[in-house]
Image (cartoon, grey):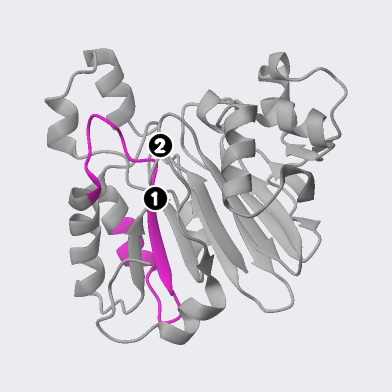
Amino acid sequence: MIVTILGSGSAGNATLVEAQGVRVLVDAGFSGRDLERRLQAAGAPPASLAAIVITHEHGDHTRGMGVLARRFGVPLHITPTTLSVCRALLSGKEQVRPYTVAHPFRIGPFEVQPFLTAHDAADPVAVTLREVATGFKLGIATDLGRPTAAVHHALAGCHLLVLEANHDEAMLWNGPYPWSVKQRIASSHGHLSNRAAAELVGELCHETLGGVVLAHLSEHCNRAELAEDVVGETLAAVGYGGALCVAPQDRPLEPIDLAALKRRAGPAQLSLF
């Protein structure tokens, strides 16, 4: 399984997952043109996508979904509630394939397991993708107001975690946002702080976790080196031996090969990909 985060942050989120020649895009939060550019930069022409999976209706996850689905005939997997609140992005010509958290579904070699999250959206979910043939498991959870029991259960046993570390608490409360926005971000239906992300990933750490990517960092209320330091300290304390990095907003992250991560995992091996 190869994972390429095309970009992550408040301006847009999209993650490309590939195995056995099948490519799946999780979220499409950039414009259609920008998504095409990022996919091409990752060596994945948009027409090669087997599916787009949408987690919730916020624009930084849905902005380009309609354009991409129509232009290239890519099936769009989305919950019925999320579909109902973002129909303005669709023309009705898309191949829509509804899903619910009640049932995992297959896309080629992947079993996709959606699960509910605590976030201020109509029907917010996060997903894991498991390559059935190898057992490799990827967890993508970029919008979490709080780490619920369902989140812990769903993300257990992942070999790669793409996890939100949205803000530094001091930077948030002293930052430029209106008070109402600060309250929303810090609420139990908002976004995870660096400290909360560190606590969660420390609890999820296990001997076959090969990589952690910190995602959805706030442009104004966080810094990559700060998020990495906070989470890295917790991971080091629990003996984590895999890799740690931060997903940028403005460009794709280098592809992550889960098989290579498994081979390189070992004691005291925290580093950038």
Q: Is residue 199 left or right of residue 82?
A: left
Q: Is residue 139 above or below residue 206?
A: above
Q: Is residue 91 above or below residue 154?
A: above
Q: Earlier in the sequence, mark 1 or mark 2?
A: 2
The verdict on residue 223 being magenta is: yes
Nearest the eye: 146 or 217: 217
One can see residue 55 in this view: no
**Residue 138, how many percent across, how many down?**
56, 63
Q: Residue at x 72, y 36 (%)?
A: 78
Q: Is residue 122 above or below residue 103?
A: above
Nearest the eye: 122 or 230: 230
Residue beneath disc 2: 9
Q: Which mark is residue 158?
A: none
Q: Decide: marks 1, 2 in contact (CB < 8 A)?
A: yes
**Residue 110, how many percent across, how many down?**
73, 63
Q: Residue at x 20, y 40 (%)?
A: 168
Neighbourhood count class around disc 2 (C-alpha, 10 Å): few under 14, some 14–19, many 20 upward: many
C-alpha gap between disc 1 and disc 2: 8 Å
Q: Quadrant of the C terminus?
A: bottom left
Q: Residue at x 27, y 57 (%)?
A: 198
